[in-house]
Amino acid sequence: MATCKECAFYKEVDETKGDCFGHEVPADRDVTECPTNAFKSKEETSEK
Ligand code: SF4
């Protein structure tokens, strides 16, 4: 299963956490636990 680290909205802060819409999320959060169900794979977007 994918994790927040693989989400297009995830901006890495350090190895263990990142920023998502201004909220800090753990890098290894399973996307099924995404509070907004907004997971979008980085691979599906052209943004880097
Ligand atoms: S949108 Fe959901 S899956 Fe993506 S980084 Fe934020 S919490 Fe994680």
Image: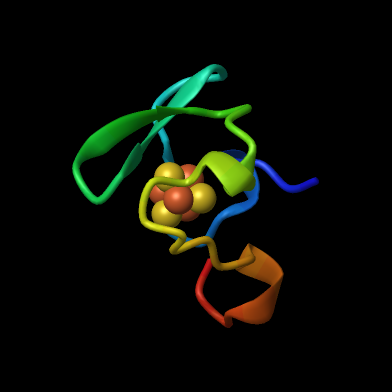
**6 left or right of 11 in image:** right
Q: Quadrant of residue 41?
A: bottom right
| Count of marks, rendered view | 0
**44 left or right of 35 in image:** right
Instruction: Check the image and report above or below for 48 versus 44.
Output: above
Report the front residue among 12 and 34: 34
Q: Position of residue 15 (x, y in %)?
A: 56, 19
Residue lying at 80% horizontally and 46% vertically, measured from the top left: 1
Residue lying at 66% horizontally and 41% vertically, measured from the top left: 3
Q: Position of residue 4 (x, y in %)?
A: 56, 42
Instruction: Check the image and report above or below for 13 versus 44.
Output: above
- Residue 10 visible at all: no
What colour scheme has been applied to the protein in the rendered image?
A: rainbow
- Residue 37 visible at all: yes
**26 left or right of 31 in image:** left
Most extreme residue toward the right, as rendered? 1
Instruction: Check the image and report above or below for 9 versus 27.
Output: below
Instruction: Check the image and report above or below for 8 versus 18.
Output: below
Q: Position of residue 48 (x, y in %)?
A: 53, 66
Q: Position of residue 38 (x, y in %)?
A: 44, 63
Residue lying at 46% horizontally and 59% vertically, measured from the top left: 37
Residue lying at 64% horizontally and 37% vertically, measured from the top left: 30
**14 left or right of 40 in image:** left
